[in-house]
Structures are given as C-alpha cells and as structure tokens.
Amino acid sequence: MMNKKAKVGVLALGRNTFDVPYAEEMLAQAWKTLSAMDIELIGQPALQFDAESALQALPALKQANLDLLLILQVTFTDASLTCEVVRDFPVPTAMWSFPEARTGGRLRLNSFCGVNLACHALSRENIKLQTIHGLPDDARVVSELQQLAQAAAIVNRFKQAKVMVIGDHPLGFDACNYNQQQLTQHLGLVLFASRCRNLSMKSKHYRIA
C-alpha cells in the first residue's frame, strides 16, 4: 500500500492582465517537470483566469482521492480564489511560485507576490500550507515537490490505519507515551487500547491449531 505513487492534483492560477504567453510557457515547463516525477498527476495544464473556470475544475480533483493539492501561482492573483479553494479542500495544499528577472520595469508574472498574499490571508484563518519558489528546471524544486508529495501520501495512508496499543508506557518514561488526540488530529489514526492483563485473559480461550 505504501509503494503507491502519490496522487497530486494541480490547479494553475493566473490573470490575463499579466504576460499571458510567458505565463503559458512557464506553465508548460512546470507541467513537463511534474510529468517526469514519480507521482500520479491529476488535472490539466490550463491556466484558470477566473473563479468560474477554476471552481469548475475542482469536482474532478476532489473525486480523485488526492494526497496533495498543488496550486501553481503562475501569475499574481488576489487571495480570494485561493482561500476559497483551500478552505474547501480536504487534503494538504502546496503553492508553487516562479522567480523572474528584475528588469526595472513591470514584472511579467509577479507570481511570488500572489503566494505571499494568499499565505497571509490563510494564516488569519489558521490554515497552513507549504510553499515552493523556483524555476521548473531547478533540481531543488523537484526534490522538494517529490518529498512533499510522498509525505502527504503517507499521511493519507495513515488515515486508513487502525492501531492497537497493548499496555501502558513505563512509569517515569514519558517519552514512550503518546497523545491520542494529536495522533487522530494530525494523522487520522484510530487507536484501540488494551491492557496486557486483558489480552492475557483473552488469549487463554484460544487454542493452537
């Protein structure tokens, strides 16, 4: 089960007031990088320029049982759409922004500013996400994306796990203790506790075939 490829859903956001041909070129490069990674890629390499088109793409992503939602912040957008998407999405989210050269004129994408604005807005709602900043051909970016996808996939698999805990931690060895509420909250684990004496009593009723 743990060897399955991570499912990564991609939503590319942009505004047509920026350099659209350059944005489409950047998206194509990013999609090529993602397609070459060891993940199952869900979505379409299409820029969503408005809320209507972006929201229409969400049902297919939600039905795919994703491990990670990756928002490509191809150009600047305000935070309203990103907040609406992330708020309503049941899986971890990451945002990828793209650097560009400073020429003294208007930025062609202003991608990083869009991620910064979205992260600030989401932080006010106590919603956390991961961010990546770099060009599609940057090996560091590819490594970080792969690690994020794998980590999200592992957490998603944990949500299907049931764990039996036998006995209590030794007195004075608090490092061996666990917090059931935190395990359920962060990993979705379902725990069943049983004392050694209870297990021993039950085992007496079984016979070795």
Image (tube, rainbow, N blue to C red):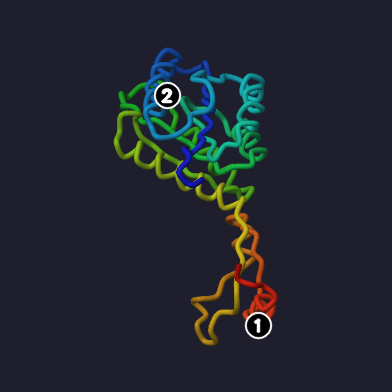
Left or right of residue 135, residue 208 in this image: right
How many dots with numbers?
Answer: 2
- Disc assigned to residue 82: none
Q: How far separated are the C-alphas under marks 2 and 1?
A: 57 Å
Left or right of residue 204, residue 142 in this image: left
- 192 up-or-down from 1: above or below: below
Identify the residue at image location x=59%, y=79%: 168
Quarter where residue 121 is shown:
top right
- Disc assigned to residue 197: 1
Residue 131 pos. (x, y %) = 45, 41
Residue 190 pos. (x, y %) = 65, 59
- 167 up-or-down from 26: above or below: below
Q: Residue lying at the far bottom in this picture: please name it.
A: 171
State the SS at label 1: helix
Q: Earlier in the sequence, mark 2 or mark 1?
A: 2
Left or right of residue 13, residue 205 in this image: right
Identify the residue at image location x=65%, y=75%: 203
Identify the residue at image location x=35%, y=29%: 136
Identify the residue at image location x=63%, y=19%: 53
- Disc assigned to residue 31: 2
Q: Nearer the viewer, residue 204 or 177?
A: 204
Q: Residues within 10 Å of mark 2 (few under 14, many from 20)?
A: some
Amino acid type, residue under disc 1 in the picture: Arg
Q: Residues within 10 Å of mark 1 (few under 14, many from 20)?
A: few
Residue 31 pos. (x, y %) = 42, 24
